[in-house]
């Protein structure tokens, strides 16, 4: 069964880039220990767009859904401490893209 890739496209205004990157750097890291998780990357735009890409790779759709409904949902619900206001989102919009891995390559050994 092929792995699946989920790319969350986040539209982030220039003045919010540092905030977004700091939030990802200090995230709870719950995804790394999730069953079926294979890879994560936060991709910063270089030119021509305000869209960051949050790339995750999963063993299968069920693994992604379990993380989405469990650790991810809990992390976002607990983003603010009791009595504190939740921080405003750094992204102005979000779109989720889904892909199946049909081919892959790795560097050849010397």
Image (cartoon, grey):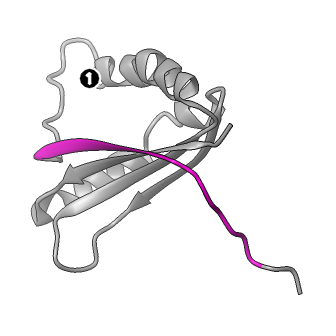
When asked about the image quadrant of residue 60, the answer is: top right
- Residue drawn at (30%, 25%), measured in percent from left and top? 79
Q: Determine which residue is flagged by label 1.
A: 80
The reply, left or right, for residue 74 in relation to residue 89 is right
Name the one closer to the observer, 61 or 70.
61
Whole-percent x and y of residue 36? 65, 31
Task: List the single residue furthest toward the bottom.
Answer: 110
The reply, left or right, for residue 91 in relation to residue 21 is left
Q: Residues within 10 Å of mark 1 (few under 14, many from 20)?
A: few
Quadrant in which the C terminus appears: bottom right
Quadrant in which the N terminus appears: top right
Name the one closer to the observer, 62 or 22.
62
Residue 108 within the magenta-colored segment of the rendering: no
The reply, left or right, for residue 108 in relation to residue 32 is right
Q: Secondary structure at mark 1?
A: loop
Residue 103 within the magenta-colored segment of the rendering: yes
Q: Bounds of the magenta span? A: 92-107
- Residue drawn at (47%, 15%), measured in percent from left and top? 70
Task: List the single residue furthest toward the right.
Answer: 110
When asked about the image quadrant of residue 42, the answer is: bottom left
Q: How many marks?
A: 1
Name the one closer to the observer, 25 or 34.
34
Whole-percent x and y of residue 41? 48, 56
- Residue drawn at (19%, 13%), measured in percent from left and top? 83
Residue 24 vertical placement versus 43 (above, below)? above
When asked about the image quadrant of residue 43, the answer is: bottom left
- Residue drawn at (66%, 26%), measured in percent from left and top? 35
Whole-percent x and y of residue 85? 14, 23
Name the one closer to the observer, 97 or 68.
97
Whole-percent x and y of residue 54? 38, 51
């Amino acid at each position: 069964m092929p792995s699946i890739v989920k790319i969350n496209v986040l539209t982030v205004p220039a003045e919010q880039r540092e905030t977004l990157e700091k939030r990802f750097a200090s995230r709870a890291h719950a995804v790394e220990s999730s069953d079926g998780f294979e890879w994560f990357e936060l991709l910063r735009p270089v030119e021509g767009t305000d869209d960051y890409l949050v790339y995750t790779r999963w063993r299968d759709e069920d693994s992604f859904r379990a993380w989405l409904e469990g650790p991810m949902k809990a992390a976002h619900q607990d983003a603010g401490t009791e009595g504190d206001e939740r921080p405003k989102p750094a992204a102005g919009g979000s779109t989720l893209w889904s892909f199946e891995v049909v081919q892959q390559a790795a560097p050849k050994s010397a």
